[in-house]
Image: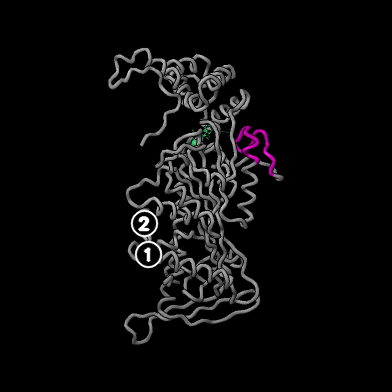
């Protein structure tokens, strides 16, 4: 197994590129203003930085977790972000992901995702855990790097159309002739290599890469075209050793090696269940690579939002999974108080069993002050390209204090549309008041329902809607 290592890497590589090009088409999402945790070098939170405002204790705690992940030594830690709705739990997790950078795997899922019909709950969790562990594979390859002095391609005498050729390459110190077979000739022609180009040739695969034109030949051609890139003629030996590093996740290796699905499943996401024998084989192979110094493990982060949606089976699976030495750091977030553990009739803090809570460190988040709310709303206005007058922002901050931060953030978009309709460049207090009357917040909606409940269908008439409804099963 794992025969096509090169294949594996090229797939993983193209997949990474694909993800990047998708994120480039930026849309403004709920957390798009968050660009990190906003910490200074000693991991102290700055008041306002990288889109983050206030919530200092939780951010500082996230900074400690960040350091723990970066050091990568301690496996299987779990962190619970617990606090009221809208206090920035998801935002902090997103900030942490940004602070970790693209090289550390960060998998984000909602607790409810495991109830997909395609696979069992434990399989979904196993995949999520394996997506959060990266393997950095080092590979040394021999390449030939030099400037093309001369090249000649001709048809072999009597050979039915096959080409043969000669290539002369030089560095500043030496010059060598190479005989080329048909394949090399074809790829040289395909890459449109000319004399004066600096190229690299991978000795194992024969792949030719054009780095650019040599500076020394810059004046030989006037019409080099706009795209011509000039590079120095390489120094030293023609043959060089080069270390190439690829990062893939354990899950990607699993998928590529599971016969029933094949690597294309990586693109469709339709991976189905993966046999445990395959995982075991891969674990031992990766351990071998590690011992041989060919690869390195990068434990990443698995973020489970709305963790109270997991049920007792998932929690007990996580208990066990956290004890494995290849476990990632698991971060969960919940806004629930003391509530029923899904799948049981027992109640517990955050709806999480006590034995799992005991394995976690809990980071609380608390409601924002007036000033912090104003600052967050201000940042959101900038993010949405919305000019807002100072008194409009004051009104909006009051709305956020009296209703919720989320509702106030929603009003920014709607108010800016109202302002645009009257062809104003700035959102005024009136615009905010108008959208406040057009769109109800949760509290006013409840009042409205109480008033008119008799005219609605399926009304149970009790009249007191609970503040936060329990999710029933
Ligand atoms: N400290 C902060 N700095 C900047 N923006 C914040 C901060 N806290 C929250 N926000 C923004 O406020 C909104 C609500 O926060 P978020 O979604 O993180 O809340 P939450 O704690 O996850 O709530 P819930 O429990 O309902 O999931 C988001 O748009 C978020 O980006
Ligand atoms: Mg959230």
**Which residue is the site of mark 1?**
258
Q: Is residue 179 above or below residue 440?
A: below
Reply above or below: 468 against 456.
Answer: below
- Whether residue 396 appears in magenta in the rendering, the answer is no
Helix, strand, or loop for circle 1? loop
Residue 300, above or below 258: above
| Residue at (48% x, 46% y) in the render | 108
| Residue furthest to the front | 346
Q: Earlier in the sequence, mark 2 or mark 1?
A: 1
Provide the secondary structure element on which disc 2 rests. Answer: loop
Q: Find the distance from the CA under tag 2 to the CA under tag 1.
A: 9 Å
Give percent across and percent down for residue 163.
Answer: 39, 79
Is any part of residue 28 visible from this angle?
no
Q: Nearer the viewer, residue 153 or 243?
A: 243
Asked if residue 61 shows in the view, the reply is yes
Residue farthest right in this picture:
42
Point 56% across, 56% down: residue: 299
Tell me the quadrant of the picture where the C terminus can be found.
top left
Quadrant placement of the N terminus: bottom left
Q: Between residues 94 and 356, which one lies in front from this camera angle?
A: 356
The image shows residue 99 at horizontal and vertical percentages of 60, 46
Residue that mark 2 sits on: 271
Marks 2 & 1, CB-CB < 8 Å contact = yes
Q: Residue furthest bottom?
A: 158
Residues rendered magenta in the picture: 43-60
């Amino acid at each position: 197994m794992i025969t096509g290592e090169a294949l594996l890497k090229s797939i993983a590589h193209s997949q990474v590129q694909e993800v990047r090009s998708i994120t480039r088409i930026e849309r403004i999402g709920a957390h798009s203003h968050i660009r990190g945790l906003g910490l200074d070098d000693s991991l102290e939170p700055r008041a306002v930085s990288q889109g983050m405002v206030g919530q200092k204790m939780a951010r500082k705690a996230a900074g400690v977790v960040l350091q723990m992940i970066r050091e990568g030594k301690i496996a299987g830690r779990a962190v619970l972000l617990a606090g009221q709705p809208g206090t920035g739990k998801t935002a902090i997790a997103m900030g942490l992901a940004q602070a970790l950078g693209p090289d550390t795997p960060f998998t984000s899922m909602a607790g409810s995702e495991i109830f997909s019909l395609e696979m069992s709950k434990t399989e979904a969790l196993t995949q999520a855990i394996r997506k959060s562990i990266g393997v950095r594979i080092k590979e040394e390859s021999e390449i030939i790097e030099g400037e093309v002095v001369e090249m000649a391609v001709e048809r072999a005498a009597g050979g039915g159309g096959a080409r043969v050729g000669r290539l002369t390459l030089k560095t500043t110190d030496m010059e060598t002739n190479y005989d080329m077979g048909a394949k090399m000739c074809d790829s040289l022609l395909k890459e449109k290599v000319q004399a004066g180009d600096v190229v690299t040739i991978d000795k194992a695969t024969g792949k030719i890469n054009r780095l650019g034109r040599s500076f020394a030949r810059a004046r030989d051609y006037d019409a080099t075209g706009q795209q011509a890139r000039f590079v120095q003629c390489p120094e030293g030996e023609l043959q060089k050793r080069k270390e190439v590093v690829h990062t893939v996740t354990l899950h990607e290796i699993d998928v590529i090696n599971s016969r029933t699905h094949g690597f294309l499943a990586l693109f469709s996401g339709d991976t189905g269940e993966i046999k445990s024998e395959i995982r075991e084989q891969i674990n031992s192979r990766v351990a071998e690579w590690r011992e041989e110094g060919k690869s390195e493990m990068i434990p990443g982060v698995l973020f489970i939002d709305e963790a109270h949606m997991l049920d007792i089976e998932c929690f007990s699976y996580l208990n066990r999974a956290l004890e494995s030495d290849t476990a990632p750091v698991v971060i969960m977030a919940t806004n629930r108080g003391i509530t029923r553990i899904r799948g049981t009739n027992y109640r517990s803090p955050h709806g999480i069993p006590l034995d799992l809570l005991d394995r976690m460190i809990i980071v609380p988040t608390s409601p924002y002050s007036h000033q912090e709310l104003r600052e967050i709303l201000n940042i959101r206005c900038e993010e949405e390209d919305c000019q807002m007058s100072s008194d409009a922002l004051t009104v909006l901050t009051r709305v956020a204090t009296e209703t919720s931060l989320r509702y106030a953030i929603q009003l920014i978009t709607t108010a800016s549309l109202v302002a645009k309709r009257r062809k104003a460049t700035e959102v005024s207090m009136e615009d905010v008041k108008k959208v406040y009357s057009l769109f109800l917040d949760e509290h006013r909606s409840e009042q409205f329902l109480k008033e008119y409940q008799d005219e609605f269908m399926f009304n149970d008439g009790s009249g007191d809607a609970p503040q936060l409804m329990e999710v029933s099963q």
